[in-house]
Image (cartoon, helix red, strand yellow):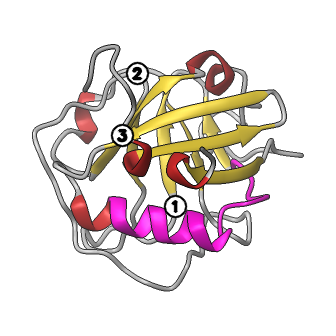
């Protein structure tokens, strides 16, 4: 993860929430296929208006399902790109089903460390600004994390397309 430097415009994602902007440094060195797909979906406007359908306090906030149910995606499965990068606060990982190669469009942002995810899910980003806004995302029910009247991503853009 980088120190205070000029962001790589092509590998920086800006998620606009109703409360402000969350900036994510994408990590193509760790997950080139996943980063390319996230950028493709962002540029298509796929993520605009999608809710955080599963939010577990102290664990993570998950989004990226156009139906808002956690059962759907963009329809394109990705091969896992597992690394030793740890799942710690602010890390962005790709959600998947039981099959490791089932990541699609759903992703999650970590509220805290979860070593049990290490090497089991693809890390493709790190929040570099706005983690306080992520902390403010409406939490779901204990256990399932299902959210009634969930918060949504107003827009998701690659920084190069904004500047």
Q: Nearer the viewer, residue 21 or 113?
A: 21
For the residues labelled 3 and 2, the Cα–Cα distance comes to: 21 Å
Q: Say few, some or many: other residues with alpha carbon within 10 Å of mark 3 (under 14 / 14 to 19 / 20 or more).
A: few
Image quarter of residue 115 = top left
Q: Label 3: state its secondary structure.
A: loop
Residue at 38% across / 48% down in the picture? 11
Tag 3 residue: 8
Report the Cα–Cα distance between label 2 and label 1: 18 Å
Q: Looking at the image, tell me whether mark 2 or mark 1 is earlier in sequence order.
A: 2
Q: Do the residues labelled 3 and 2 touch (CB within 8 Å)?
A: no
* Residue linked to disc 2: 89
Secondary structure of residue under mark 2: loop
Q: Nearer the viewer, residue 53 or 42?
A: 42
Residue 45 position in % (x across, y down): 68, 68
Identify whether 95 is placed above or below 115.
below
Mark 3 or mark 2: which is in front?
Answer: 3
- Which residue appears at 29% of the width and 32% of the height? 87
**Span of residues in magenta:** 35-52
* Residue drawn at (47%, 36%) of the image: 24
Would you say the residues marked 1 and 3 are in contact, meaning their CB atoms lie under 8 Å apart?
Answer: no
Q: How far apart are marks 1 and 3 (CA)?
A: 23 Å
Please say if 22 is above or below 10: above
Provide residue 51's location: percent of width, then percent of height: 74, 53
* Nearest-to-viewer mark from 1 and 3: 3
Residue receiving disc 1: 106
Report whether 58 appears left or right of 37: right
Report which quarter residue 128 is drawn in. top left
In the rendered structure, does residue 156 fall within the stretch colored magenta? no
């Amino acid at each position: 993860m980088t120190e205070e430097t000029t962001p790589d415009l092509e590998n920086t994602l800006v998620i606009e929430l109703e409360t402000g902007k969350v900036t994510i440094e994408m990590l193509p060195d760790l997950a080139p296929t996943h980063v390319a797909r996230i950028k493709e979906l962002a540029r298509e406007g796929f993520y605009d208006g999608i809710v955080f359908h599963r939010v577990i306090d102290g664990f993570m906030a998950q989004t990226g399902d156009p139906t808002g149910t956690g059962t759907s995606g963009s329809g394109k499965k990705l091969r896992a790109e597992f690394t030793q990068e740890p799942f710690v606060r602010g890390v962005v990982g790709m959600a998947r089903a039981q099959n490791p190669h089932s990541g699609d469009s759903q992703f999650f942002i970590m509220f805290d460390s979860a070593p049990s995810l290490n090497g089991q899910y693809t890390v493709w980003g790190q929040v570099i600004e706005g983690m306080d806004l992520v902390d403010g995302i409406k939490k779901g029910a204990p256990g399932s994390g299902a959210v009634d009247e969930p918060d949504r991503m107003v827009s998701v853009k690659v920084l190069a397309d904004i500047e």
